[in-house]
Amino acid sequence: MKILVINAGSSSLKYQLYDMTDESVMAKGLVERIGMDSSILTHKPTGKEEVTEVSDILEHTTAIRKVLDKLTDKVHGVLESIDEIDAVGHRVVHGGEAFKSSALITGEVKSEIRRLFDLAPLHNPPSMMGITAAEANLPNVPHTVVFDTAFHQTMPEKAYLYAIPKVLYKKHKVRRYGFHGTSHAYVSKAAAEFLNRPIEDLKIITCHIGNGASLTAVKDGVSVDTSMGMTPLEGLIMGTRSGDLDPAIVPFVMNKEELTINEVNSMLNKHSGLLAISGASSDMRDITDGMAAGEPNATLAFEMYEYRLRKYIGSYAAAMNGVDVIVFTAGVGENSAVVREKVCENLTYLGVEIDKALNQVRSGDPRRISTPNSKVEVLVVPTNEELVIARDTLRIVNEMK
Ligand code: AMP
């Protein structure tokens, strides 16, 4: 079975085509600058040369048509015809309380995703554009949807409710949802498989630290707490997002600086985090380079980032009354040995001990970086959200038979 995975943003669209007989990637790529002039399509067929094409792609339907053209292209293609695509899996960020797992897309599912626009105004509308566009181009195959929030629907009330008037939850569904669920689910399962232990016996803290960043406490194989909240702003310090802060700062700053709701939202989401503290960059590579060069603002940004991350690990160890495994994943987690080292250096009270040489090893496979004496297994597990989407799609399609 061949499955096309689509991750649509407002001006971009990522895709991967899987052959599910061996879960191999046949081709992947990205369309950028949709709706602007000089849109760029980058197509990487496995075993063939990468190709880049610049043209004006005004909306998502054209973007998908161009992708399908590339997938069936005589030179750069990997398919004889688009009829070889058996199903399409879509990523949608917010599934609210309605979606506790992935789903086959139906009219009702689409209406529910639209009802959730309110909760995720930046993320769900572009995903919906991707779905509509893909359905228009591939009307005869099943389409499925995989939600970033679904894995966290197992959180207990004490973890997902905010201590604010309950009417806000009843009327507007103000609660914590958590994000990156596909990644947390994948790496926690992969960690248990790597250790050859049943996931039900493990207390795992998964650290998905990339541009966006969140931690999850996984107990008995399910999410019991996670650091992102109603939106992906809560929790850790991120590239451009503040993470946790005193909510009273919002009205205070709005008043003092005469900011609108949109402006303060933009400040906290796009102009805060590592970027704001370092005054230079949101990219951890620049921060660690700056720190190595003795740059004080980069050093402070790193220290604040690492401190928040370590505090959250401690709080999740407390939430689960212990931790057996800590997993690092995503851009920073998979690549930054110095972040992992500094965090683990201060977790000795939990019995964490990492092997500094193993921590420097680079590999695309799951690996252990803790010593044999460490009481907690510390692993680096590359995430693969697209593969989860393809696997869930395969499962849903098989269940339809
Ligand atoms: P992601 O959102 O998972 O794609 O992660 C992207 C982020 O990972 C980038 O913005 C960088 O901050 C970080 N990153 C990528 N490569 C490295 C690296 N070699 N060292 C440190 N951070 C990295």
Image (cartoon, rainbow, N blue to C red):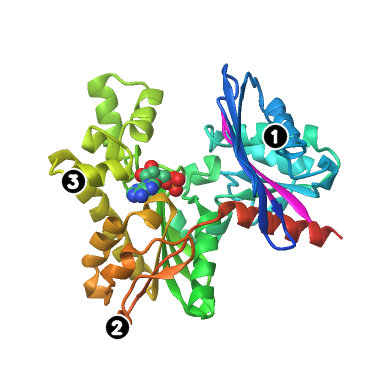
Instruction: Please tell me whether residue 203 is drawn above or below residue 334 in the rendered image.
Output: below
What residue sits 50% from the left and 66% below the top? 188
Dominant secondary structure, magenta: strand
Q: Amino acid at mark 1?
A: Val
Spatial separation of the CA atoms under disc 3 and disc 1: 42 Å
The residue carrying mark 2 is: 373
The answer to whether the residue bearing label 3 lies less than 8 angstroms from the nearest atom of ligand 1 is no
What residue sits 52% from the left and 80% below the top? 196
Residue 378, magenta (yes or no): no
Q: Position of residue 357 (x, y in %)?
A: 28, 69
Quarter of the image for the C terminus: give it: bottom right
Instruction: Please tell me whether residue 222 is drawn above or below residue 257 in the rendered image.
Output: below
- Residue stretch in magenta: 1-17
Depth check, mark 2 against mark 1: the one in front is 1
Q: Secondary structure at mark 3?
A: helix
Which comes before the other along the chain, label 2 or label 1?
1
Q: Position of residue 298 (x, y in %)?
A: 20, 41
Which comes before the other along the chain, label 3 or label 2?
3
Q: Secondary structure at mark 2?
A: loop
Comparing 154 with 212, the one in front is 212
Q: Are marks 2 and 1 in contact (CB under 8 Å)?
A: no
Residue 234 in sight: no
Spatial separation of the CA atoms under disc 3 and disc 2: 31 Å
The residue carrying mark 1 is: 67
The residue carrying mark 3 is: 291
Q: Amino acid at mark 2?
A: Asn
Number of numbered tags placed on the structure image: 3
Q: Crowdedness of circle 1 by 10 Å Cα count: few (<14), some, many (20+)? A: many
Q: Amino acid at mark 3?
A: Met
Q: Position of residue 334 (x, y in %)?
A: 40, 57
Q: Crowdedness of circle 2 by 10 Å Cα count: few (<14), some, many (20+)? A: few
